[in-house]
Image: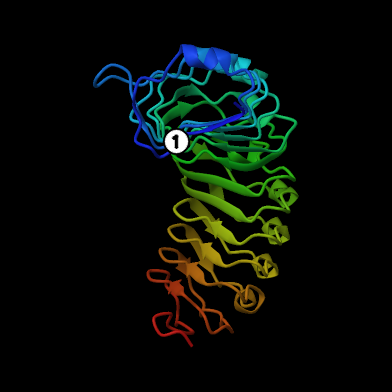
């Protein structure tokens, strides 16, 4: 057997332990959306015998009732490429033995109850990696000083801490970065952000990041969604934002921005559909946006002299 798909069948009972020892050729195992459990009312246990699935490339166990911890034996599955272990109630720490999984390119561990520190090896692989650990509210540690070949990274809702300006998050391969609801994230947005020219989603929200938005942000010409809300950012929005013609959603609300909005923003970011700027100290008129499909403009509490148009009745 090479592939086994049993997801979405409401299967229940304990996961077998001995069965995996004979599946030496198995490459894909998907058991998502079931109700596997151990003793009645007890947690599911990921069998340590999973480690004998040497040929396995894909492991999908997301969305079970409850699971105890990640067994270190998973580090023996050195052929793994894609791991889906989200929404499972996983507890404990991320085993160091998983560092042996050098071929892995997708790791989904979001919305569990993992603790300890984020291992550095998870963001320093030679293959392009997608890593989601968001929603693990007890997972901490420092921001990685160096990130290599990470395409998508979500640390949202964790206790990972550090100075954003000193972390090496903005690599050339980065496409999506989610850093929201992270009160231990501080410092400023670095000018090194310009290196992430493939970035199309950037979320830095609900943090203690302060300072101004660097003018280099205008070099992110693939950016579509930019969320910088609920931080301690200040100063003026850089006029270079108008250089991002791909921008469709911009949220800078709940900061300390002031002064005039870039007058070229409306003409440059012509595809902008969502613009939230409320709870700042902007003082200028709203730039005129020359498009007909505006979806939402929210500017309340921003001290504008006047609004160029009302988004409730698009022009």
In the displayed structure, does residue 90 sit left or right of residue 188?
A: left
Image location of residue 16, percent across then percent down: 42, 17
Choose top left, top right, bottom left or bottom right for residue 74.
top right
Image location of residue 105, percent across then percent down: 66, 35
Q: Secondary structure at mark 1?
A: loop
Res 139 visible: yes
Choose top left, top right, bottom left or bottom right for residue 266.
bottom right
In the displayed structure, does residue 208 sit left or right of residue 28?
A: left
Residue 295 vs residue 21, the one in the foreground? 21
State the quadrant of the N terminus. Answer: top right
At 40% from the left and 31% from the top, the residue drawn is 88
Farthest residue, direction bottom: 315
Up-down relation of residue 282 to residue 125 (above or below): below
In the displayed structure, does residue 83 sit left or right of residue 279?
A: right
Choose top left, top right, bottom left or bottom right for residue 201.
bottom right
Res 73 visible: no
Which residue is labeled 1 in the image? 32
At 54% from the left and 26% from the top, the residue drawn is 118
Farthest residue, direction left: 41
Q: Residues within 10 Å of mark 1 (few under 14, many from 20)?
A: many
Up-down relation of residue 256 to residue 172 (above or below): below
Residue 305 vs residue 119, the one in the foreground? 119
At 54% from the left and 84% from the top, the residue drawn is 292
Residue 20 vs residue 273, the one in the foreground? 20
Up-down relation of residue 198 to residue 91 (above or below): below
Image location of residue 170, percent across then percent down: 68, 43
Image location of residue 101, percent across then percent down: 66, 22
Up-down relation of residue 224 to residue 139 (above or below): below
At 64% from the left and 26% from the top, the residue drawn is 80
């Amino acid at each position: 057997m090479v592939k086994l798909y049993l997801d979405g069948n409401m299967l229940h009972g304990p996961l077998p332990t001995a069965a995996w020892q004979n599946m030496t050729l198995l490459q894909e195992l998907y058991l998502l959306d079931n109700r596997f459990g151990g003793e009645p009312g007890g947690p599911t246990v990921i069998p340590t015998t999973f480690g004998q699935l040497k040929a396995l490339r894909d492991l999908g166990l997301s969305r079970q009732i409850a699971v105890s911890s990640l067994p270190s034996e998973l580090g023996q599955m050195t052929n793994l490429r894609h791991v889906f272990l989200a929404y499972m109630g996983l507890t404990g720490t991320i085993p160091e033995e998983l560092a042996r999984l050098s071929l892995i390119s997708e790791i989904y561990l979001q919305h569990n109850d993992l603790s300890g520190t984020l291992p550095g090896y998870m963001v320093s692989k030679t293959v392009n990696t997608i890593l989601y650990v968001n929603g693990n509210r007890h997972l901490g540690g420092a921001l990685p000083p160096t990130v290599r070949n990470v395409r998508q990274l979500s640390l949202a809702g964790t206790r990972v801490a550090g100075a954003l300006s000193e972390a090496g998050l903005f690599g050339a391969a980065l496409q999506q970065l989610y850093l929201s609801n992270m009160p231990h994230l501080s410092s400023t947005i670095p000018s090194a952000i310009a290196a992430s020219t493939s970035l199309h989603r950037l979320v830095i929200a609900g943090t203690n990041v302060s300072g101004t938005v660097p003018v280099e942000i205008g070099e992110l010409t693939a950016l579509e969604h930019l969320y910088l809300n609920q931080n301690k950012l200040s100063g003026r929005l850089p006029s270079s934002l108008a250089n991002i013609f791909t921008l469709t959603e911009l949220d800078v609300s709940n900061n300390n921005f002031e002064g005039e909005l870039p007058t070229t923003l409306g003409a440059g970011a012509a595809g902008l559909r969502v613009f939230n700027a409320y709870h700042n100290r902007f003082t200028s008129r709203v730039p005129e946006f020359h498009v007909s499909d505006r979806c939402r403009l929210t500017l309340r509490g921003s001290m504008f002299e006047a609004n160029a148009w009302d988004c409730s009745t698009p022009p």
